[in-house]
Image (tube, helix red, strand yellow):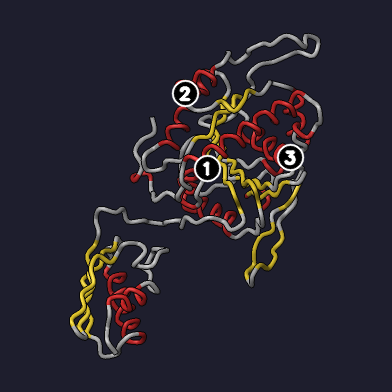
Amino acid sequence: MIITKESVIEVLKTLTIPGSGEDIITSGSVSNIQIFGDQIDIDLKINNPSLQARKKIDVEILKAIHSKINIKAKIKTNIKVDSSRPTPSQPIKGKPIAGIDSIIAIASGKGGVGKSTVTANIAVTLAKMGLKVGVLDADIYGPSMPLMFDLEGERPVAIEVDGKSKMQPLESYGVKILSIGFFTKPDQAVIWRGPMASKALNQLIFDAAWGELDFLLIDLPPGTGDIHLSIVQALPITGAIVVSTPQQIALADARKGIAMFQQESIQIPVLGIVENMAYFTPDELPDSKYYIFGKDGAKALSESKNIPLLGSLPLVQTIREAADYGRPAALQEDSLVADSFKLVVQELARQVIKRNKSLPPTKAVEITTMTGCSAVN
């Protein structure tokens, strides 16, 4: 049988580098193939420096070519370690989830600004509009979605999908939800190091039967850390929302959250800023607004960063009460809260459409440790 370069390429497409999800042709690992009769020379670059990995791929190439092309072929594989690419320690493979159109990460630089409350209310507002919505509670150490959706004490069941066992997200008010809080007791602290938390998060993402969703909202923990890196590694995020109050201390941390998404190694579009607790209007003075945490702070930040302001939400007692009761306040028809969240969601939809028209799909980020990421300022 005549050995051709094309036949060798087709065989190599069936092989993957250890620790990589792509075949060695698609990944660009093969730099050169030369055919001299029954002699095949293959130049290969890999970013896994271990001797075991190099021996394994060498043996797999030999076996594949002998079994599928010519058992008498003489094969010489020249393997070099590509030091220009970071070696992943515990990579999470980035891949889209079948059936999910848009994945929106909702973040805040600072805790206590109402990020989870905003996430829950955006979710139910989208569901009220007839969209299919899911929420992934990625706040591993402080999950709040079980309480906000009146699902405390509930636990997802396992179902079989295409021969595989999957978690079925719980559903409340038309929103599918998964949270580590479904697997812990209310008074139980989650005391995990970063890799363990990332592994649990990976299971919530990929071992779940989300089904068809228009939006998957990811409620991130405050700050910028392991969980954030795990999320941007694991999923191609459509865009991010940053939540802040108008207070300067909160805005300072919001800037860091924006900077994280805009880093050259991450490059996730920031769809907009939501200003929470923007003003307070007493019932007895419906035409008055009191700017308890400052005025137009998020607006000024959005203008300075050239990022849209998705909307400003009032400081209303019913929002807090509804969250504690397990029924998001945006469910209440014809209310100030519901109208405010509707405006935010409408602007969010416009920004998603604009983003999809002007930018290519976001790729999962190839960073695995904090050393692969410059400091966020």
Task: Give the residue type that dot 3 points to.
Answer: Met
* Residue neighbourhood size for the residue with mark 3, other residues' Cα within 10 Å, grouped as few (<14), some (14–19), many (≥20): few
Q: Residue at x 68, y 38 (%)?
A: 120
| Type of the residue with mark 2 | Ala
When the figure is inspected, residue 148 is found, relative to residue 164, above or below; the finding is: above
Indicate the amino acid at tag 1: Asn
Name the one closer to the observer, 341 or 352: 352
Q: Residue at the left extreme?
A: 36
Q: Is residue 169 visible?
A: yes
Question: Residue 143 in the image: x percent, y percent?
Answer: 63, 42
- Up-down: is 216 above or below 222? below
User: On the picture, is 74 further left or further right than 86?
Assistant: left
List x then y, in percent, for residue 81: 24, 62
Compared across the picture, whether 299 is left or right of 12 comes to right
The correct choice, above or below, for 13 with respect to 311 in the image is below
Task: Name the quarter where the C terminus is drawn.
Answer: top left
Count of marks, rendered view: 3
Mark 3 or 1 closer to N-term? 3
50 or 79: which is nearer to us? 79
Position above or below: 181 against 15: above
* Residue picked out by circle 2: 252
Whole-angstrom CA distance, mark 1 to mark 2, is 29 Å
Q: Which secondary structure, mark 2?
A: helix
- Classify 10 Å Cα crowding around label 1: few (below 14), some (14-19), many (20 and above): some
State the quadrant of the N terminus: bottom left
Give the residue pinned by disc 1.
356
- Callout 1–callout 2 Cβ contact below 8 Å: no
Q: Earlier in the sequence, mark 1 or mark 2?
A: 2
- Name the residue nearer the viewer: 36 or 117: 36
Q: CA distance from mark 3 to mark 1?
A: 20 Å
